[in-house]
Image (cartoon, rainbow, N blue to C red):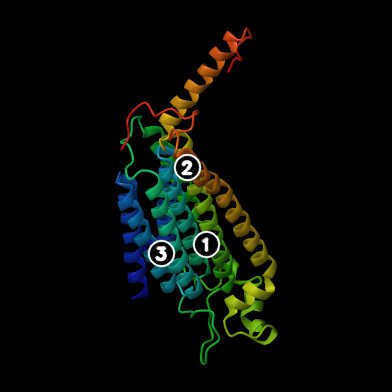
Amino acid sequence: MEQIIDIVLLAFMVVTAIAMIRLRNLFAVVMLSGIFSLLSAAMFVVLDAVDVAFTEAAVGAGISTVLMLGTLALTFRDERPATRADWPAMLVVTVTGAALIYGTLDMPRFGDPDAPIHQHVAPRYIVDSPREVGPPNMVTSVLASYRGYDTLGETTVIFTAGIGVMVLLGSVTRRRRRARPTTPATPAAPAPPEGRP
Amino acid sequence: MLETVLGLYNYWIVIILMMAGFYTVIARGNLAKKVIGLNIFQTSMFLMYITMGAVESGTAPIVAEGATLYTNPLPSVLILTAIVVGVATTALGLALAVRIREAYGTLEEDDLRVLEDRQDTLRDTAATQDGEQPVSP
């Protein structure tokens, strides 16, 4: 039963991704990316990674969608139809994909309990973490204790990204406010050659 | 044969999704669409890690009565970090897109290239009028 749900959900994800590539209306694409994130969250539940599932549902489907909608509000709703041939990209993608699929033939089969990934540190986390750290949830123990420095690094990355976004967008709003009484566009930015909506 | 296909199905779908994201990044000219493609690529990577961590008939890695086989908690932890970092990079990429639209009035790569070329030519002609040699590109 689990296997069937797994197959169907992954097939849905592929369909959603292809629809996202083909659609030119960016609003629809953003909505589909929310659906894509929710499908992946459902997939994580099927694969027993519940912590990842609710983070993906909250952050991937929630915050990412809001960020993208905000960007659309500040930029354009539509993407211009392609002007150049896309067969070189198709070729690159097909060759890379084929090489990667060839690489998977040596991977341990799905759900194999003897796979190398389960042999090294994972048993220690599973057996000892409830006693050594305390919380019954092993993911929490590893995140906050065994690999706490990773989480610290993650926080640093978010902090840096936050500063970057503030620096980039702060100047945008300031220039807008300053430019409003006089000419709207900055002198270095002439209008694009083809008029866009 | 069927066992191989079922055992590797998840990885193959991950690769198809990864290539879908890759294609969006290299073949589409719109910068916002490129960021979305990057997001697809990211999610496929998350799926790959979680697939590797899954154990047949295992349960979620939370201590419970009667549970003996747990899935691997380590990929979950790594991917939790990756999801949050992914959103941070998405936000930065989208902010850059907004900033580029503000400066150039477009998000299409082709237009941006034309505008850049035109600015370079303008700078060169201005330099020649001042009696200097134009800087060769």
Is residue A76 depicted above or below A4 in this figure? above
> What type is the residue that disc 1 sits on?
Ile
User: Does A172 sit left or right of B130 as displayed?
Assistant: left
**Mark 2 vs mark 3: same chain?**
yes
Viewer-closest of A24 and A121 = A24
**Which quadrant is home to the C terminus of chain B?**
top right
Question: What's the distance in space between the residues labelled 3 and 1, CA to CA?
Answer: 12 Å
Residue at 37% from the left image edge and 33% from the top image edge: A87
Viewer-closest of A86 and A75 = A75
Residue A74 visible from this viewpoint: yes
Which numbered disc covers residue B110? none
Is residue A70 depicted above or below A180 in this figure? below
Residue under pointer 3: A40
Residue ranking furthest to the top: B131
Q: How many marks?
A: 3
Residue B109 point in image, percent of width and height: 43, 33
Residue under pointer 1: B83
